[in-house]
Amino acid sequence: MNTLDNLARKLGITKAEISLVSALIGFLVLGGILKNFRSMEETDLLVKKAEIARYRETEVDSLIRLASADQASIREDMQGEKAEESSATAGKRRSQHALEKKEFNGTLAFNRATARQLQKIPGIGPVMAAKLVAFRTSKGGKVKDFEEFLEVQGVGRKKLELLKKHFTLE
């Protein structure tokens, strides 16, 4: 006897019913495979879109602009240091630097300022300026909120008010 006949007799169903159930199970398995394949294609598509969004031209342009601004400020600082060293002695530089600090009443764009520019603000010396620059670097080169400055060692509420007065966060 045929295997299909034996199965039909044991289950108490006809050969046609066995064929129909087998076809339905086959379609169910095939549907599961296709669904899994489509979800993998959708995942690949989403990953590609994310990579494209990461490297948009505007982001690359902004990074280039930031790098060129940093290079320009470094050049200015280097030229300023050379001019100072040739025109004044160390003592005069300290007193002149102290006068610049006391006279400074404007604002600086913190996310682009150099350590030397930060030292022009009253209450910020070389050590604090270095801490602020290191903090900015740890934040990816951009500080978005003044409250973040409280994470810097040596910055409390009083110093934060001073920073708010002299900094802009562009």
Image (cartoon, rainbow, N blue to C red):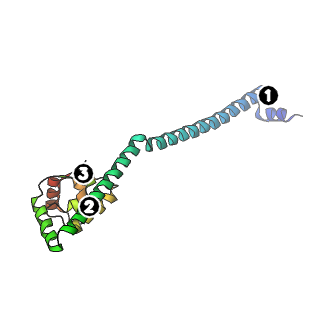
Give, as a three-letter code, the residue at label 1: Lys
The image's mark for residue 145 is 3
Q: Residue furthest top?
A: 16
Percent x, y of residue 151: 26, 61
What is the x, y in percent for residue 63?
A: 37, 48
In front of the other: 121 or 158: 121
Instruction: Report x, y in % for residue 90.
Output: 18, 73
Ranked by sequence position, the earlier of labels 3 and 1 is 1
Report the residue at 52% width, 41% height from top.
48
Q: Can you say whether 9 is above or below 103 in the image?
A: above
Which numbered marker is on residue 15? Answer: 1
- Is 137 displayed left or right of 86 in the figure? right
The residue under label 2 is: 79
Front residue of 140 and 157: 140
Q: Nearer the viewer, mark 3 or mark 1?
A: 3
The Cα–Cα distance between marks 3 and 2, rounded to whole angstroms, is: 32 Å
| Amino acid on which disc 3 is placed | Asp
